[in-house]
Image: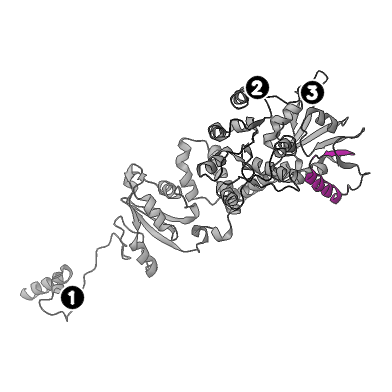
Amino acid sequence: MPHDWASIAQFLGPLLDRVDDAVREVQVVIITPDADVAAAVTAAAVKLTVGRDVAIVAATSAKRAARLIRIKPAQVIAGPAETLVELLKSATVKLDAVRSVCIAWADELIAQGATAALETVMTEAPKDSGRTIVTAELTPPVEELLERYARRARRVSAPIAETDQPMSVDYVTVSARSRLASLRRLVDEIDPPSALVFVREGASRIEVSDLLAALGYAGDASSIRTGIAAAPGTDTAILFDLPASREELREAAGSAKRTIALIQPRQLNSLRGLAAGGALKPITLAESGAQARGRDAKVRDELRSVLRAGQFGRELLALEPLLDDYDGIEIAAAALQLFEKERADRASTPAAEVSPARQREPGSMVGLFVNVGSRDGARPADIVGSIASQPGVTSADIGRVDVRESHTTVEVSATVADLVIERLTGSNIRGRRAVARRDEGMKREAARGPRPGGGRDTASGKRDQGRDRGARPASRTPRRDTPAGDPRSSSPTSRAPLAASRKRDRE
């Protein structure tokens, strides 16, 4: 069977016919590759058991399924092998009364490496229970699985007859939820003079008919209609559902000039088998390509505007060390990847969950002291790189960096200061173990404001008090009201003038 939800009824119907409505125990187990397939299987089972009192559970989550089964025991359960194992371990599900076990689809389940969990479930199933194994293609691993769990099984397939000829099929890759939207875009792009939309499932038929009516294709006389067979002279056959056999595909395509399938990635192998060796050609809808190209053009325009401004400082210092190992265009490509990832993360994060670092107000910066300086070979780029590489910290959280001989002072956002201190301390910067702490000196200096005539700090971190470094300090006149014996009277600046006065008196 192909990987098509519309074909599930063909193998599920006979299994559900064997369910005894009066027995409130699990009688049918369908082991699926993932939760999506499980949900599709149970959705089909609900439609096939209309009018019957059959309890059906999709074990897409072990916790949720266990709660539902405790409320009402399940008779039909479908789920991934790992989830079923969890339910068996918790004794929520017992397989003593199981009449049928179905593996759908075996090739995909093997590809996902779920054979260990599958073996656990199959060991718990009664030996006399019926076995149905669905696969899109017969590979050696599938043959081995058949030999283990369904030895000498009767095989039902659609072999290639001598009259079967390869068919060429174009395809558009879609998700289960985007099929309708992709169908609309496909009709807009190819604008066929006539077309058949192949639909097998009742719900799909209603959705497609409503969409076509909204586009102006209503009624049996419309140039685009739904059905299972293309009439002679039809220009395009669009496979909204995937046919279950080659015969069904040939009937759907009829004599159409072109056949286009809307498939999910997992259905590609099924489509390849249905095409009987014919050419498969992927189609990229122009609207999707235009959107992608439009996004790239917008990014390039943003970069051009920044390059024209040409105001680079800390950014150049931060990237300069990378030029030793990488070409400039490679560095730019990596920066673009980070930029687009950050943009995508912001777009997917609700406003209430934006990190405090993004919500800080301008000016909310604090100073940090780092015990690594120029004598260690450190540059501003090294300090910036060590801080910006910490998770939760961005370049917007880093301000002025001042590298001195024995240490560095750096401004960071107040919201990430403690995080930077914690993670920077103990890290290695230019071969030295870094120690970071809040710089209280910078904090007091910022509170006092700039001093008149003050200059930059020396290596010790103190201001030069506004005087010229080459000038000698002026003599200070001693305070006349200083009492005798006061320690201030013995300072060097007060003793020198007093000694000179006594010398003049003696002369």
Q: Which quarter of the picture shows residue 160? A: top right
Query: How far across and down, in percent of the image, does residue 394 sit?
Result: 49, 52
Residue in the picture at 56% in, 61% down: 352
Residue named by callout 2: 152
Marks 3 and 1 sit apart, C-alpha to C-alpha, by 111 Å
Residue named by callout 3: 166
Q: Which quarter of the picture shows residue 282? A: top right
Whether residue 210 is in magenta: the answer is yes
Q: Quadrant of the N terminus?
A: top right
Q: Kindly identify the amino acid type of the residue bearing the numbered disc 1.
A: Pro
**81 or 165: which is nearer to us?**
81
Please state the extent of the stretch shown in magenta in the rendering. 193-216
Q: Quadrant of the C terminus?
A: bottom left
**408 or 35: which is nearer to us?**
35
Marks 2 and 3 sit apart, C-alpha to C-alpha, by 30 Å
Q: Secondary structure at mark 1?
A: loop
Is 173 left, or right, of 465 in this rendering?
right
Q: Nearer the viewer, mark 3 or mark 1?
A: 3
**Eyeballing the image, is 464 above or below 424?**
below
Whether residue 284 is in magenta: the answer is no
Seen as rendered, the residue at the extreme left is 506
Q: Kindly identify the amino acid type of the residue bearing the numbered disc 2.
A: Arg
Is 422 left, or right, of 171 in this rendering?
left
Q: Nearer the viewer, mark 2 or mark 3?
A: 2
Seen as rendered, the residue at the extreme bottom is 481
Packing grade of label 3 (10 A; few <14, some 14-19, many >=20) is some
Query: How far across and down, in percent of the image, does residue 491 sit?
Result: 15, 69
The reply to whether dot 2 and dot 3 touch (C-beta < 8 Å) is no
Q: Which mark is residue 138?
A: none
